Image: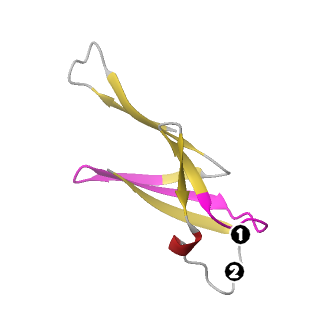
Amino acid sequence: GIEAYDLTDSKNPQRLWDLKYENNNYFVNARLTKGKLYLVLNSYLDQNLPCPIRPVLYNQKALEIPCTDIYRPSDIGSSNLTNILKLD
């Protein structure tokens, strides 16, 4: 997972948030751009319950991506799924 800390007082860092990968998701890459963290995660699609997708826990709360926000090609040749998340 990933944790963010406020290091204003380096002797007493304060945790701002944490993120844990869920449901067979694993880290691929990340970028911090203009104060926003972009994560690329991969997972294996559950053919029995393809959506909603719950890729991570953010501060112990499940981030849920509804079916209407998921692009699925009509001919899926793989059960591998790529998630791109933006965190403010």
Structural crowding at the residue carrying mark 2, measured as other residues with C-alpha within 10 Å and reported as few (<14), some (14–19) or many (≥20) = few
Residue located at (79% from left, 66% from top): 48
* Label at residue 38: none
Question: Residue 74: image x %, image y %?
Answer: 66, 87
Please provide percent x and percent y for residue 43: 64, 58
Identify whether 57 is placed above or below 12. Answer: below
Residue extending farthest to the right is: 48
Magenta stretch, residue numbers: 29-53
Residue 3 visible in this rendered orientation of the protein: no
Q: Nearer the viewer, residue 53 or 85?
A: 53
Query: Is 8 contained in the magenta span?
Result: no
Inspect the image, locate mark 1, and give the three-letter code of the amino acid beneath it: Ser
Picture layout, residue 23 above or below residue 51? above
* Residue beneath the point at 69% across and 65% down: 45
The label number, if any, that marks residue 79 in the structure image: 1
Q: How many marks?
A: 2
Query: Is 27 displayed left or right of 3 in the figure?
Result: right
**Of the pair 17 and 30, the residue shown nearer to us:** 17
* Residue plotted at (74% across, 65% down): 49
Classify 10 Å Cα crowding around label 1: few (below 14), some (14-19), many (20 and above). few
Q: Are marks 2 and 1 in contact (CB under 8 Å)?
A: yes
- Image-based side of 35 in relation to 15, left or right: left
| Image side of residue 38 versus residue 1, left or right | left
Quarter location, residue 44: bottom right
Residue 17 position (above or below residue 62): above
Q: Secondary structure at mark 1?
A: loop
Q: Residue at x 60, y 78 (%)?
A: 72
Residue 34 in percent (x, y) is at 22, 54
Q: Which residue is mark 2?
A: 76
